[in-house]
Image (spheres, coloured by chain):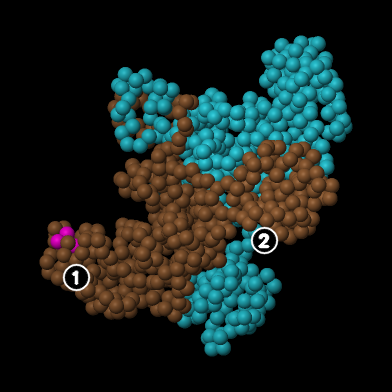
Chain colours: A cyan, B brown
Amino acid sequence: MAQKPSIPKGTRDFNAAEVAKRTYIVDTIKSKFEVFGFQPIETPSFENSDTLMGKYGDEGDRLIFKILNSGEYLKKISDDDYALKSEQKLTPRISEKALRYDLTVPFARYVVQHQNEIEFPFKRYQIQPVWRADRPQKGRFREFYQCDADVVGSKSLFQEIEFIQLYDAVFDALNLKGVTIKINNRKVLSGIAEVIGAKDKLIDFTVALDKLDKIGEEKVKAEMLGKGISEEGIAKLQPLFELSGDFGGQIKSLKAILSNSEEGLKGIEELEFINKAITEFKLKSANLELDVTLARGLNYYTGAIFEVSAPEGVKMGSIGGGGRYDDLTGIFGLKDMSGVGISFGLDRIYLVLEELGLFPDTITASTKVLFINFGETEAIACLKAVTKLRESGIKAELYPDKAKMKKQMNYANRRNIPFVVLVGDEELKTESFTLKDMVSGNQNVVSYNELLNKLK
Amino acid sequence: MAQKPSIPKGTRDFNAAEVAKRTYIVDTIKSKFEVFGFQPIETPSFENSDTLMGKYGDEGDRLIFKILNSGEYLKKISDDDYALKSEQKLTPRISEKALRYDLTVPFARYVVQHQNEIEFPFKRYQIQPVWRADRPQKGRFREFYQCDADVVGSKSLFQEIEFIQLYDAVFDALNLKGVTIKINNRKVLSGIAEVIGAKDKLIDFTVALDKLDKIGEEKVKAEMLGKGISEEGIAKLQPLFELSGDFGGQIKSLKAILSNSEEGLKGIEELEFINKAITEFKLKSANLELDVTLARGLNYYTGAIFEVSAPEGVKMGSIGGGGRYDDLTGIFGLKDMSGVGISFGLDRIYLVLEELGLFPDTITASTKVLFINFGETEAIACLKAVTKLRESGIKAELYPDKAKMKKQMNYANRRNIPFVVLVGDEELKTESFTLKDMVSGNQNVVSYNELLNKLK
């Protein structure tokens, strides 16, 4: 291979510093998941194709990575079928497995498959990579991690309350203060659509409403009109565009709009219950905000809808999202299993922490001390000390070769190793160590115990 | 979907207890990797096909999972080519990516691709899943984790010494005492083949020798004879079959056999150097053993060869292995990069720890306390306490629904939650908690502070 090797587009190599930072985020999320009572599960990277296909719409089906069957995979295809030369015909015949596209469908599959071993309500978390054959672009990858927590088997609104607390706990632990947790409710959106006589146009209505921040009131109204929503209906929306005040104030306005919609009022009631509890418990550093325009994954959610945005001033899409879906496992034949869950966007959280300089210095700390190699005898004496330091939990290394002093010091420097130990004739004789502080440049002759204490 | 869903053969779901145990092993390995100065990297799950194909032999090529191209993947294939209906022709045209088959080739690719950002010698570790389209059987899966540590860019034998210490440190930390680290050297095997006049039959010779334990001396000799090794040559092997004594004793016998082979004596010298250092430093609980029949991955290794077996009495194949390969990155055009590395077999280590009952009780501990839900008012009071407990790092849960007492208690029981808290009218009034120990059955009325102390 003459050419320098590369990796597929949309994928990434992670170096040590990047792995350490990603691990820091994942470990923080994990520890909060566990303290909230969520249990980890893992599912295989690939599933049978029929588990995944048809669950994410046509676009999703196209974006699922399919795995080619092994062996003589063309053998069982008739010549006539083969001659059609059609991907649509061929793909299901030559591929029976596909890479996980998200963690939700495999979770639903898991719940149905293992329903007899599971105690419900089942609180699970899952942190694993997923793959999508999306066009790669800034911040969008073909392989990326999802960090999901879900509860299945309970309709209690206490779940929604706990998920808001969980978001708050995680972002606070990451020292990312001031995130906004936006909440909405599918029932409120349905109610509004009902009230303005556009019940059959719920999707069109919410898609347009979702753009309010970006394109403004007039253009939203124009789009709704274009989609066949009546002027009279749109007029009824006016209070929606003028929603203001805090959570409670907005709820009041919404109640007025929705007074004739039973479903809408049910949604309001849920939002009020959640807000009341959160107000009473107080969040550590996040803000809870009602956002009636929030409609993500609408086909899917049936109750609460969540989305988290980075603190003001940071330009970044949502760094988390989720919601309630009343029939999570129905696709696999298990009815009446309400689920609610949230997800953390690892890559975006990483970018936000990087931008705000919030990664603790300690996490990228690599090796603490490098022992310089002056030759076999010295190296053996060094390795003895290195072995003891490691047993005390100190990250220590011996430079493996008797290279030029300058080369070894450069190695320590470039790897940001803060201490270097030199053992020559004199040190061998006196069983001592010359310890050099690479930052200050100071150097001292010390005993092993002094060395250990200094490095601890 | 009428049928209960399933997962592809050779893959596994892991439940919470299994994830916790696997995490325990991985975290132990990781912490030792880091204390020895290894740095983590991660590479993508799939690589460009030309990075992987041809690197593992024909059998390997067949076992690599290939990913189907997206979109109209048949379009650019001419009708004539297509009409051949040949997997061999079609596969490279419809698949340009493949799932990682091991961690070594992606590591070599990584080193070459990032050579300008890397400080050599480069000590990296990598713990990620790999995929093989092997026939699944007991203990062999199509998706499994590899845990590898390698150094590239130094020929120093101190690396081999440190890897033996690393094996010892990991297995000792896992409380798996008495593993045997077997070591051999490719140069010794080459030397023996040279001495018996079978230099061109090195593979046949070592394959036969490798079976000594299983089929015995006579059958091994017969196999060698069958492969065209002369009787005279085989006669010279006699001391090899009678090797006995400790490491030093065996080295002595080998020296006699290899006195005329420069390469063989070089191998002996390396083994002696390593053994001397290990004898001086002492291992914590592992045994180092010379095994001249050890030949794993011979095509690949050029110096030391390692294999670890479980403590006596545990029937299990090797739980780790590795060795030195003098030209790791040559396949990608970067010459003269000697590498040496070891691997830990996660699945087998898991089975051994399970068999010997070595998993600490603490690691599967799930939620510590469940608060029973008697209704909205009580639940809100409970959630307040739950929130505070979680902030103190205690895994606490509120049962989300006002279900029958018995159902909630059963839930705690089946999930092995050791404490349950009940808050009714009386407790609400006095701001107290009834704490029930699920093991002893004892129950006490306590204040929040007493509760916290009890659960800590």
Q: In the rendered image, which quarter is residue A345 located in? A: top right
Find residue B317 and report its horizontal and vertical position in percent. Answer: 35, 58
Type of the residue with mark 2: Thr
Q: Main secondary structure of the magenta part?
A: helix
Is residue A375 covered in magenta? Answer: no
Alpha carbon distance from label 1 to label 2: 57 Å
Residue placed at 54% from the left, 88% from the top?
Answer: A429
Give residue B295's mark.
none
The residue marked by circle 2 belongs to what chain?
A
Find residue A398 and report its horizontal and vertical position in percent. Answer: 52, 72
Q: Is residue A246 above or below residue A78?
A: below
Is residue B223 covered in magenta? Answer: yes
Q: Is residue A213 above or below residue B264?
A: above
The residue carrying pointer 1 sits among few (fewer than 14), some (14 to 19) or many (20 or more) residues within 10 Å by Cα, namely some
User: Exactly how many numbered labels are in the figure?
Assistant: 2
Name the residue carrying label 2. A362
Find residue B416 and report its horizontal and vertical position in percent. Answer: 59, 50
Image check: B57 left or right of B437? left
Work out whether residue B110 or residue A344 is closer to the camera in this orientation and state it: A344
Name the residue carrying label 1. B237
Residue B377 appears in the rendering: yes
The magenta span reads B220-224
Find residue B431 and report its horizontal and vertical position in percent. Answer: 82, 50
